[in-house]
Amino acid sequence: MRDLAIETSGLVKTFGDNRAVDGLDLTVPAGTVYGVLGPNGAGKTTAVKMLATLLRPDGGEARVFGHDVLREPDAVRSRVSLTGQYASVDEEMTGLENLVLLGRLLGHRRAAARDRAMRLLEAFGLTEAAGRQVKTYSGGMRRRLDIAASILNTPDLLFLDEPTTGLDPRSRNQVWDIVRIVVAHGTTVLLTTQYLDEADRLAGRIAVVDHGKVIAEGTPGELKSSVGSGSVHVRLRDAVQRPEAERVLAKELNTQVQLEADPVALTARIAGDDADAGAERASRALAALAASGIVVDDFSLGQPSLDEAFLALTGAPPGEHSLALTDHPATDKNAQEEAA
Ligand SMILES: Nc1ncnc2c1ncn2[C@@H]1O[C@H](COP(=O)(O)OP(=O)(O)OP(=O)(O)O)[C@@H](O)[C@H]1O
Ligand SMILES: [Mg+2]
């Protein structure tokens, strides 16, 4: 209703005694990319399936453009699209044939369906592959075709459930460009991701979800500033001095110091949200390191990353959340689910 694409309150889905979605509250403004960021098993796909009317909630409420998912599922379905669900791409057919067929199924005349298909293939960089069977496509091409198929009808709300999991950096960039194009045409996008940088780049607002609940919500900037005004990154000349450097930094910054995998590197968060005060404390810390005879090769003050935000919010190290902090994708569970 009004300008909200999605509104959920206390949404619950249980599988046996596993509360996969455990009182989820989401408010997604229309016309934006909304990021749902969470590790494996956080409940992202389960939430998306309930919002797309593919799965029945066990409790709470969910509305899509003001329509209740349980009481008005047809009204919801008429306005949403989900990659992997409506985009039932046939491997034996070419990319063009797939899009034309889907366009015809959506009620477009042949010429219009072909025209729309050609334009989408071009926009998604698939013109040259248009005449090839989909089974010869790379993972990135296939993902782009899936998204093209899901926006044939320009839905008001598009669910993209981990659209870049398993893709190489170049293909991820192409999908990001597509998401930007889709939103520019007025479609609201609910994007789930395990990639912090992806949410940061694409989403206007982000909900961080853990164990089926929203544990933080805001703009990327707000989430970052809730973590502190910044982090200092220090590289030492000699790894032997790291314990002493850790002690000095902890005392000077009054914060926990993280030891990086690199034996000469340390990182410390600076509390508070005042960037000027943060810079001053950082320079005092540098002076204290020098006064203790510690040789510093590199010292930098950076804005906190979303990685750091997530860790600060959940209080758990990355391993325990299996969050993808690098470009190396985790196992592509969603793709396996779709294939099954
Ligand atoms: N059909 C199902 N039957 C039983 N348990 C399920 C089912 N679907 C999901 N779950 C469980 O619900 C929890 C949430 O799963 P969900 O797939 O929603 O997480 P996710 O955030 O999408 O994770 P991922 O990033 O790995 O895709 C997990 O513990 C999962 O094992
Ligand atoms: Mg999932």
Image (spheres, rainbow, N blue to C red):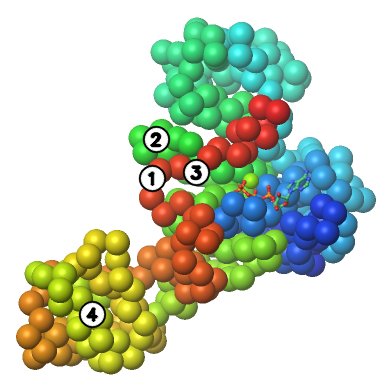
Q: What residue is pinned by disc 3? A: 330
Front: mark 3 or 1: 3
Write down the quadrant of residue 325 in the picture. Answer: bottom left
Q: Residue at x 36, y 86 (%)?
A: 255
Q: What is the CA distance from the residue labelled 2 to the residue labelled 4?
A: 38 Å
How crowded is the residue under tag 2: few (<14 C-alpha within 10 Å), some, or many (20+)? some
* Element type at mark 2: loop
How crowded is the residue under tag 3: few (<14 C-alpha within 10 Å), some, or many (20+)? some
Q: Do the residues labelled 2 and 1 touch (CB within 8 Å)?
A: yes
Q: In the image, what residue type sits under mark 3?
A: Ala
Q: Which residue is drawn at 32% across and 79% down?
A: 257
* Element type at mark 1: loop
Image check: 99 left or right of 244?
A: right
Q: What residue is pinned by disc 4? A: 243
In this picture, is 128 found above or below 321?
above
How crowded is the residue under tag 1: few (<14 C-alpha within 10 Å), some, or many (20+)? some
Q: Residue at x 54, y 71 (%)?
A: 314
Residue 169 image offset from top left, x and y in percent:
37, 38
Specify the quadrant that holds the N terminus: bottom right
Q: What is the CA distance from the residue labelled 3 to the residue labelled 1?
A: 9 Å
Front: mark 2 or 4: 4
Q: What residue is pinned by disc 1? A: 327
Q: What is the CA distance from the residue labelled 2 to the residue labelled 3?
A: 12 Å
In this picture, is 47 found above or below 106?
below
Query: Relative to the observer, which residue lies in front, 16 or 160?
Result: 16
Determine if the C-beta at disc 3 is less than 8 A from ligand 1.
yes
* Element type at mark 4: helix
Q: What residue is pinned by disc 2? A: 168
**Which numbered disc flags the more N-terminal residue, 2 or 3?**
2
Image check: 138 left or right of 234?
A: right
Does residue 327 show up?
Answer: yes
